[in-house]
Image (cartoon, rainbow, N blue to C red):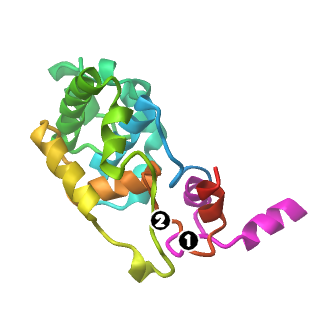
Amino acid sequence: MRKAEFDMEKLTRCPWVPLDKPDYVAYHDEEWGVPVHDDRKIFEFLTLESAQAGLSWYTVLRKRENYRIAFKEYDPRLVAEFDEAEIQKLLGNPGIIRNQAKIRASVNNARQFLKVQAEFGSFDAYIWRFVGGQPIVHDITTLADYPARTLESDELSKDLKQRGFKFMGTTICYAHMQAMGMINDHSHGCFRREEIISR
């Protein structure tokens, strides 16, 4: 083992990170909690988070590339145009979660996403309002410190639902806010916490 690889193993990470799953570790180290302002990336996370409902994030993470292909590189304009034939094709795709309600919700959400973009200029401008435009940094030490929802995720969920989005409950919204860096829930001691704060 090279020194760089050995050092990587010695890094302190959040308590939820399964060190026996390299792809999960990479997701934590490279993406989770990093502020996202690109609309297509935001749409990707919305699509994946809604697909996660009732499942583990790792189940979705392992299918991420399949989703990327099936959902046209996460271009909301293309997904919004999916017709019944395309939906049936998705339902037959073994590389994604073949839940009819979730697939239809993703197509619906793409259409609502475009409406929000038209209203606010970008989805980024819309969604970051729920945290005042800056990441909220929580004091996290142990697994017990992680909330499942917050006032901010409650408000986001309520607003998204009013706008016609599906599978956007407050717990899903909170996970989405964590993933795209609206909330920094890296724990004290995690090497990514201060790296992201200082960016």
Q: Residues within 10 Å of mark 1 (few under 14, many from 20)?
A: many
| Type of the residue with mark 1 | Cys
Q: Mark 1 — residue? A: 14
Question: Could you say which is closer to the camera, residue 65 or residue 152?
Answer: 152
In the shown orientation, is residue 198 left or right of residue 154?
right
Residue 144 picture quarter:
bottom left
Q: Residues within 10 Å of mark 2 (few under 14, many from 20)?
A: many
Region in magenta: 1-28
In the shown orientation, is residue 110 left or right of residue 33?
left
Q: Mark 2 — residue? A: 185
Which residue is at a point 48% across and 75% down the rendered structure image? 140
Q: Is residue 19 magenta?
A: yes
Which residue is at a point 71% across and 70% down the rendered structure image? 11
* SS at mark 1 in the image: loop
Residue 189 picture quarter:
bottom right
The spot of residue 128 in percent (x, y) is 36, 43
Number of marks in the image? 2
Residue 166 picture quarter:
top left
- Given contact means CB atoms under 8 Å apart, are the residues at marks 2 and 1 in contact? yes
Question: Could you say which is closer to the camera, residue 177 or residue 76?
Answer: 177
Q: Looking at the image, is mark 2 or mark 1 earlier in the sequence?
A: 1
Q: Is residue 101 magenta?
A: no
